Image (cartoon, rainbow, N blue to C red):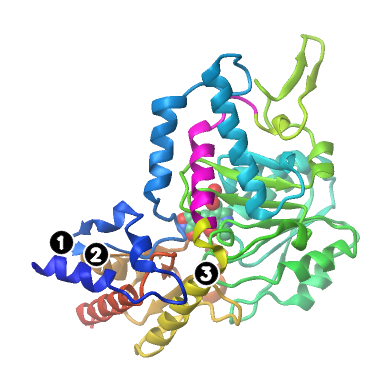
Amino acid sequence: MNTVAQEFRALWGAAPAAGLDVMRLRWDFPILRQTVNGKPLVYLDNAATSQKPQSVIDCEAHYYATLNANIHRGVHTLSQLATDAYEAARGATQGLIHAARREEIVFVRGTTEAINLVATSYGQRLRAGDEILISAMEHHSNIVPWQMACERTGAILLVAPINDAGELLLDEFERLLGPRTRLVAVTHLSNALGTVNPVRCLIELAHARGIPVLVDGAQAVPHLKVDVQALDCDFYAFSGHKLYGPTGIGVLYGKAALLDAMPPYQGGGDMIREVTFSKTTYNELPFKFEAGTPNIAGVIGLGAAIDYVSAVGLEAIATHEHALLAYATGQAAQISGLRIIGTATEKASILSFVLDGVHPHDAGTILDLEGVAIRAGHHCAMPVMERFGVPATVRASFALYNTREEVDALFRAVRKAQEVFA
Ligand code: 7TS
């Protein structure tokens, strides 16, 4: 056996952790069998996007090979089959997040578009002096759309601060909820720090004052069991591509009463009931928000990803990833000159750190030579970097297929980077 094969075996021969048969599951992901720079791929950039199981890849190919037709408009057989498959994926999505009603699931391009939809459409009711409250740990896509809405309307963006561990300061958050607060928009799981926010509690505080809440669930949905009814959130946004699904597809959940009262986001085909040159009436939910031919293959592929994750079990995935994060945190603590950024009590799936004397980008390059894929940068959360006084971090982020042996490979590569720059 050559060394690469031996290394593969070392990475794949992991003992099943916490009930997940990781070794078997890894075979579902063809990309993981690759080498990068002559080394077995150790893919730890799952917060950016996760890899896709064969079932998702096959599902998209099968759609194009056997079903391809436009939806919601054809009487012919293929169009009806494609429509059925598309709507079945909506049902699967509803089940995944336990939405009360199917029409509360709107398909969009991703989390970014979901938040822009709310900021643009719901944002039309903002008036000068109204306030939007976000947190200091938001991804740019939960900052910039609100800044743009504020620019359009004269509303004001307020930011709830975090402590040195990367936890939201609840007292400050509550203090910032005022008579002019029109919406709270907060992340469920921080992509830069790994902090899991107490969103149920935040929603209760906001609802006690009649303020609706949007939750950015881009990082949470692949790692935690989300129940939008139990949370009682008003909007919930996530992306398919971080959930082992295709790129270019995502979900906006919104309570039906809120979505119903909101104006359309884009105009075009499918979102109308009747069009004349003098007046157009809009379609019912969710179609009012799905103008034009949607990403049909993406939606169907997302359905396959949801089936996959549901079969593996989100609780089992969360337990496995939690054990990996705890193991990685312990390993990191043994490396001198390494500082973890984000040490909240409640964390999931993400380990961000900096190394004395090694710029994160240089560390990323050395790690890549060792076959270890991480993200080095500001993670589209520049205000978080500023808060912690660092230009960037190295971020390892875990998925259901990662192993302890891969964590060991990560830290072997980190030590190598330290040696190179010593
Ligand atoms: N919100 C959070 C918390 C995210 O982590 C991301 C993407 C987004 C929103 C935007 O999602 P998109 O699918 O619309 O792009 N985060 C990352 C990341 O951490 N590295 O690459 C993308």
Chain-order first, disc 3 or disc 1: 1
Magenta stretch bounds? 291-310
Chain-order first, disc 1 or disc 2: 1
* Mark 3 vs 1: CB contact within 8 A: no
- Is the residue marked by circle 2 packed among few (<14), some (14-19), or many (20+) residues within 10 Å? many
Percent of width and height locating residue 255: 79, 47
Q: For the residue marked with disc 1, what is the amino acid?
A: Gly
Percent of width and height locating residue 341: 49, 77
Q: Nearer the viewer, residue 147 or 35?
A: 35
Quick one: quadrant of the C terminus? bottom left
* Mark 3 vs 2: CB contact within 8 A: no
Query: For residue 161, which quarter of the picture?
Result: bottom right
State the residue position of label 3.
Answer: 316
State the residue position of label 1.
Answer: 38
Residue 318 is inside the magenta segment:
no
Q: For the residue marked with disc 2, what is the amino acid?
A: Gly
What is the number of the mark on residue 371?
Answer: 2
Q: For the residue marked with disc 3, what is the amino acid?
A: Ala
